[in-house]
Amino acid sequence: MKNNQIGQIQERIAELKKEHDVCILAHSYQSREILEIADFSGDSYMLSKAAAAVSQKTVIMCGVRFMAETVKILSPEKRVILANPTAGCPMAEQFSAEYIAGIKAQLPDYSVVAYINTTAALKTVCDVCVTSSSAVDIVRCIDNDKILFLPDCNLGAYVQAQIPEKQFKLLEGGCPIHAAVTAEDVRAAKVLYPDAAVLVHPECTPEVVALADYVGSTSGIMEFALSSDKSEFIIGTEMSIAEHLQYSSGDSGKRFYSLSHKLLCPDMKVTTLPEVLGCVRGDAGYGEEIALDADTAAKARVCIDKMIAYGG
């Protein structure tokens, strides 16, 4: 039975979001109680598209800062609030726009491909955005054989392996959470769960990816696991996904195991249900409204629009 206090907070949020005409977005890595009160849950780009389509003029993002920025870029007329202002992303914040502009000057004949997990400022100096699920298809479509891929060198290496005919320049960046998992972790998990399929995110290292039965985005991993005929799965992305899959699979008999305890994103865990309540209620000191100057928003949108044009 659900904790009564949690249930009461969720009920109050549900009432207030209707009263205040608010849409709540929650990334898949958020806690179960937050996903339950969200209007939409999923990956960052899916949430941005959903926000652009809804009628509500206020959107609360339960995720990290770059996700809220992406929502604002695609919906500049809306009020976008990041539920917890301290929720950042080490990968998104690794490189400054000035640093990448300097790299571009050294490699003027390269197309700059930015993972959507980047800041709005960094997107202003990039040619096209990609998601983990669309990266291979979009890079293949780019009319240039030279690709500067950033910030995640592991995702970049995964894309490079699928498109060996193109020349890639990868920077030493990426998700420190996914990158912390080792091939030994995979082998150890296989010993514990010998009948389980290994599903990993391409932000993991090439050594880990090589041992996987399936490699894909968070949404791809979830879809694969729920539709697969197999009954056991080792989940190589943020730990919450194994839990969410267990709920979603109901009484199917399927079992989901987290690949490693290292796969815990602290920035995705800082947002709490009471904070979401404070944001919906409009209490002082809760959340932060995302503000982007018109020039940054316009320039950052160029690479996102290019991604959409490529079918991403």
Image: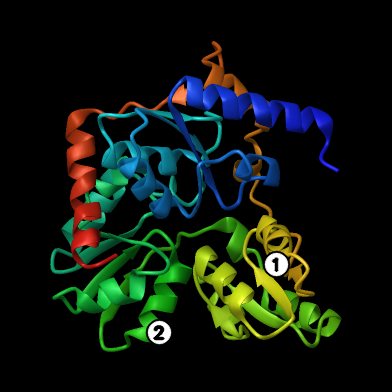
Q: How is the image coloured?
A: rainbow
Q: Going by the image, does 67 lie left or right of 234?
A: left
Up-down: is 189 above or below 6? below
| Label 2 or label 1, whichever comes before in sequence order | 2
Provide the residue designation for mark 1: 249
Residue at the (34%, 44%) spot, across then down: 96
Across and down, in percent, residue 121 comes to 29, 41
Label 2 sits on what residue type? Ala
Could one spot residue 277 in this view of the protein? yes
Residue 270: quarter of image: top right
Could one spot residue 117 in this view of the protein? no
Provide the residue designation for mark 2: 161
Up-down: is 264 above or below 60? below
Count residues near mark 1 (Cα–Cα under 10 Å), then give few for <14, some for 14-19, many for 20+: some
Of 133 and 36, which appears nearest the observer?
36
Up-down: is 108 above or below 38? below
Q: Going by the image, does 207 lie left or right of 174?
A: right
Cα distance between the residues tagged 2 and 1? 33 Å
Across and down, in percent, residue 59 comes to 42, 32
Q: Residue furthest top?
A: 284
Q: Going by the image, does 136 lie left or right of 173?
A: left
Question: In the rendered structure, are the residues bearing label 2 and label 1 in contact, judged by CB atoms less than 8 Å apart?
Answer: no
Residue at the (81%, 40%) spot, across then down: 2
